[in-house]
Image (tube, rainbow, N blue to C red):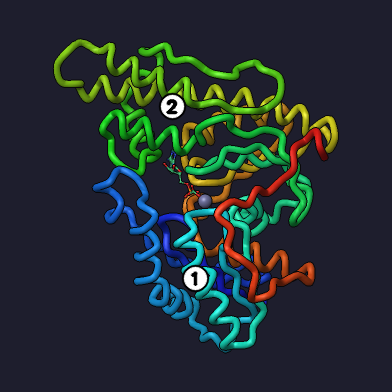
């Protein structure tokens, strides 16, 4: 089975051809970074227009790279939420149009589910597994029990981790997107120079809170001696922030592993997904956390952690293999939670 996947929910216009043998035949990603950079963040209206301008070319490129025509495609999968609704509508409408014109099944994919299932494309990870989903819009710990079956163990009470990286980068003048910029700056910094707080550390459960840490970075910046901030100051602040995030993530994940293990067994798989999973310092820390609990860490390659069409095609394949597809009048959804809370089942 060969599926075309389309992703347009944020600032990447992406299309990919993937088959049910877990082969990524093409994976084309056009980042709109340069268009959003002057504004220091993603501008929804600019994103939607850029998707509209480029999506047909990106799909053609994905088919060319895969060396197949639409005749060889068995189904079309497109993100229908959650995300910036203008962009989601562009991708969803394109996917539906192709499926209508070619009389192919259409699968409307939940973007978060696509992140959650990527490890099954890259590593054939069996259910159940514990997932840490960390992106610009989401920070969640989930028990992934099957396709469409998720239980939430923890979530953020305020900012998403990627959002905190982006905001701190903006504060420090490191540019956009913030995650990679902070990681680069942190590489030459002293993580012990600024004593930043670790909100929620040791608390019961697995929820996160990032806004206090973000404020503490702002206060540390304001507390520096008057005059221009040196590169070393910036590097030390970035490193101190990243270390605090790593401590928070480690503590919350440790709690979630304990809860997961109580129900599903004491050795298992911890999967990290979403854009922040590209952070190497965080990955190293998660490896240690997994090891100490007799869990194995699975992390898809960074290019499949940030937004891409391959994960959308794969989520489509998973649903098709279960005999599912969607009617063409299925609606795009700006909000679409994946899970129910642990307590409510
Ligand atoms: O999954 P993604 O591509 O888009 C969303 O669905 O949000 O994640 C983007 C987020 C941004 O906040 C970006 O700053 C963050 O992932 N990110 C990183 C790194 N690379 C991307 N955060 C920390 N370290 C990185 N290396
Ligand atoms: Zn994403």
Q: Is residue 292 visible?
A: no
- Callout 1: helix, strand or loop? strand
Side of 343 relative to 211 (left or right)? right
The residue pinned by badge 1 equals 26
Residue in the image at 55% along x and 54% along y: 334
Which one is earlier in the sequence, the residue at label 1 or at label 2? 1
Which of the two residues, 158 or 199, is positioned nearer the viewer here?
158
Some atom of ligand 1 lies within 8 Å of the CB belonging to the residue at label 2: yes
Q: Is residue 338 visible?
A: yes
Q: Position of residue 149 (x, y in %)?
A: 77, 51
- Callout 2: helix, strand or loop? helix
Residue in the image at 51% along x and 54% along y: 83
Residue in the image at 28% along x and 48% along y: 37
Q: Position of residue 339 (x, y in %)?
A: 71, 45
Residue in the image at 72% along x and 66% along y: 319
The residue pinned by badge 2 equals 242
The quarter of the displayed image where residue 121 is located: bottom right
Residue 161's place in the image compared with 235, above or below, is: below
Q: Quadrant of the N terminus?
A: bottom right
Name the mark nearer the viewer: 1 or 2: 2
The disc label shown at residue 315, or none: none
Ligand 1 occupies quarter: top left
Which of the two residues, 299 or 91, is positioned nearer the viewer here?
91
Side of 73 relative to 234 (left or right)? right
User: Whole-Å distance between the Cαs marked 1 and 2?
Assistant: 34 Å
Q: Position of residue 38 (x, y in %)?
A: 24, 48
Q: Position of residue 179 (x, y in %)?
A: 40, 38
Side of 19 relative to 264 (left or right)? left
């Amino acid at each position: 089975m060969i599926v075309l996947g389309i992703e347009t929910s944020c600032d990447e216009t992406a299309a990919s051809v993937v088959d049910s043998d877990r082969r990524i035949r093409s994976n084309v990603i056009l980042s709109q970074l340069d268009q959003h950079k002057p504004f220091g963040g993603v501008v929804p209206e600019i994103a939607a227009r850029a998707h509209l301008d480029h999506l047909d070319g990106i799909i053609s490129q994905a088919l060319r790279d895969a060396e197949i025509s639409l005749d060889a495609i068995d189904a079309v999968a497109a993100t229908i939420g959650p995300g910036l609704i203008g962009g989601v509508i562009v991708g969803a409408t394109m996917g539906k149009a192709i499926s209508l014109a070619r009389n192919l099944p259409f699968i409307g994919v939940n973007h978060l589910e696509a992140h959650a299932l990527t490890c099954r494309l890259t590593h054939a990870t069996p259910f159940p597994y514990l997932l840490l989903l960390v992106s610009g819009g989401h920070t969640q710990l989930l028990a992934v029990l099957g396709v469409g079956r998720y239980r939430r163990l923890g979530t953020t009470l305020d900012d998403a981790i990627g959002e905190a990286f982006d905001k701190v980068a903006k504060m420090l003048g490191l540019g956009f997107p913030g995650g990679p910029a902070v990681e680069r700056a942190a590489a030459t910094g002293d993580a012990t120079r600024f004593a930043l707080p670790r909100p929620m550390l040791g608390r019961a459960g697995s929820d996160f809170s990032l806004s206090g840490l973000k404020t503490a970075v702002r206060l540390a910046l304001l507390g520096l001696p008057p005059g221009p901030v040196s590169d070393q100051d910036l590097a030390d602040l970035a490193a101190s922030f990243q270390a605090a995030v790593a401590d928070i993530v480690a503590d919350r994940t440790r709690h979630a592993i304990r809860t997961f293990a109580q129900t599903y067994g004491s050795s298992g798989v911890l999967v990290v997904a979403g854009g922040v999973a590209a952070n190497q310092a965080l990955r190293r820390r998660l490896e240690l956390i997994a090891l100490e609990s007799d869990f194995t860490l699975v992390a898809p390659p960074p290019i499949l952690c940030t937004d891409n069409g391959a994960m959308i095609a794969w989520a489509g394949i998973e649903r098709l293999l279960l005999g599912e597809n969607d009617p063409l009048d299925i609606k795009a959804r700006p909000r679409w939670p994946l899970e129910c809370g642990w307590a409510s089942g």
